[in-house]
Amino acid sequence: MKALTQDRYGTSDVLEVRDIERPEPGENQVLVRVVAAGIDRGAWHLMTGEPYLMRLLGFGLRAPKVAVPGTSFAGVVEAVGPGVTTLKAGDEVYGATRGTFAEYAVASVDKVALKPSQLSFEEAAVLPYPTFAALQALRDHGHVQPGQRVLVVGASGAVGTIAVQLAVAFGATVTGVCSARNVDLVRSLGAADVFDYTNEDFADGSHHYDVILDIGGATSVARLRKALDRKGTLVIVGGEGDRWVGGLQRQLWATALSTLVPQKLTVVVAKENTADLVTMSELVAAGKVAPKLEQTFPLAEGVAAVAAFEAGDAAGRIVIST
């Protein structure tokens, strides 16, 4: 089968499309013919091996253990392994696994769900990663309730675009933070107000929120707390930092500080699971969530697709199709 592969850590320049052996499903696994795979920040970190701490956590010291990058997909079940009873060959599915930038991938059945019929394969392929992160952040950590004020920092990204829609669906009044070129996009998602972080300071103390969702950023905990209600909740989803530990220092500081202040400061470690995908499918069917696509590249141009993601010019999600 054709796959986008890497034999060392790095950016798009280490990738190459080549023929490799097709995987076979094991117990409680399904073999999926991948129709589309979404590119996201999580998959990019696994590809580059940064922060370096990831390498010590078992992903491979000198090269990734999984030579095919990609973590989110949508496709058709080709075969099922022993013990699989909930899915069958021919089912249209979406979910999460390693090695999705390929014609076929194997996934654990407990990380896969039936694809929403309302979505194309390309649209469904970009949903798994932000579904887990945004849904668990808002529902399980932020405990967002109707009428609350929610601030989403990083509102135009993969997780942010879904988080804004989810918070609105939960009945919150949402404010987004993004760059000037994405203000209209974030408003179209349902945000009542939007800060252009290049010209406005959302943490100047003039606005306060019940829940702040900070996604993939580097804003200090002190600044975020200035925009948080006295008994509000800050939820940190990922974060950028140095190449050694990434945003871990900020996350650890937030966790430690939370024991000393009235505000709740928490960190999300997203867990991949079928139940959250089913919840997302229901929200899609109800018209409350819809992914925003920018461009689709064929697998043969997978290197260019990842390069486009790295350039950061896209207003929506980038997809690789097979």
Image (cartoon, grey):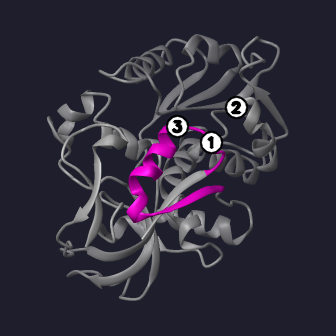
Labelled pair 2, 1 in contact (Cβ < 8 Å): yes
Instruction: Judge from the rendering whether residue 231 lies leftward or rightward of residue 84; answer left or right.
Output: right
Label 3 crowd (10 A; few <14 / some 14-19 / many >=20):
few
The magenta region covers: 292-316
Label 1 crowd (10 A; few <14 / some 14-19 / many >=20):
many
Which residue is rendered at x = 59% and y = 63% of the image? 280
In space, the residues marked 3 and 1 are separated at their CA atoms by: 18 Å
Secondary element type, mark 3: helix
Q: Position of residue 87 (x, y in %)?
A: 38, 83
**Which numbered marker is on residue 160?**
1
Of the two numbered discs 3 and 1 in the rendering, the one whose residue sits closer to the viewer: 3
**Which residue in the structure is indicated by mark 3?**
311
Q: Is there any visible trace of residue 172 in the rendered image? A: no
Q: Considering only order in the chain, which callout, 3 or 2, is on the residue closer to the N terminus? A: 2
Amino acid type at circle 3 is Ala
Amino acid type at circle 2 is Cys
Amino acid type at circle 1 is Gly
In space, the residues marked 2 and 1 are separated at their CA atoms by: 9 Å
Q: Position of residue 196 (x, y in %)?
A: 76, 26
Q: Is there any visible trace of residue 105 in the rendered image? A: yes
**Which numbered marker is on residue 52?**
none
Labelled pair 3, 1 in contact (Cβ < 8 Å): no
Q: Position of residue 299 (x, y in %)?
A: 40, 64
Residue 122, by quadrant, is bottom right
**Which residue in the structure is indicated by mark 2?**
178
Q: Observer-nearest residue: 280 or 100?
A: 100
Instruction: Judge from the rendering whether residue 17 lies leftward or rightward of residue 171; answer left or right.
Output: left
Instruction: Judge from the rendering whether residue 233 lies leftward or rightward of residue 66; answer left or right.
Output: right
Q: Observer-nearest residue: 297 or 244?
A: 297
